[in-house]
Amino acid sequence: MAQTAAPTTGAPAITPISLKVIAPWAVFFGIVMLILLYFVGAEQGATSVISGAGVHEWVHDGRHLLGFPCH
């Protein structure tokens, strides 16, 4: 059986996403990343928000992977 292809009329138009739509998501993910960076890089010692060594133990390998000294 022969198959026929439908004729193409051109590439579909790509509509740009406005900055108004992207900005709230960019701010949200930026804040989340800063919080994550704090817990991996600085949550120990004098600037500790959470007492104890629980957070340190959870992020210990990630801390070494990213090059943060911890001991």
Image (spheres, rainbow, N blue to C red):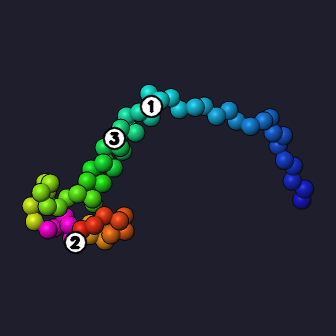
Q: What residue is shown with label 1?
A: 21
Residue 58, numbered circle: none
Q: Secondary structure at mark 2?
A: loop
Q: What residue is shown with label 3?
A: 28
Residue 50 location, quadrant: bottom left
> Which quadrant holds the C terminus?
bottom left
Amino acid type for the residue under numbered disc 2: His
Left or right: residue 13 compared with residue 28: right
Amino acid type for the residue under numbered disc 3: Phe
Classify mark 1: residues with Cα within 10 Å, few (<14), some (14-19) or many (20+): few
**Which of 10/63 is in front?**
63
Give the magenta range: 53-57
Q: Main secondary structure of the magenta part?
A: helix
Left or right: residue 54 compared with residue 19: left
Look at the image and say whether residue 37 sits in the magenta stretch. no
Where in the figure is residue 35, as x and y percent of width and height?
27, 50
Q: What residue is shown with label 2?
A: 71
Identity of the residue drawn at 31% across and 64% down: 68
Q: Is residue 4 visible?
A: yes
- Pointer 3 with pointer 1, Cβ within 8 A: no
Which of pointers 3 and 2 lies earlier in the amino acid sequence? 3
Nearer to us: label 3 or label 1: 3
| Gap in angstroms between the C-alphas marked 1 and 2 | 43 Å
Identity of the residue drawn at 27% across and 59% down: 41
Where in the figure is residue 56, as x and y percent of width and height?
20, 66
Q: Is residue 62 visible?
A: no
Left or right: residue 12 compared with residue 53: right
**Vertical relation: 11 (above or below) 1:** above
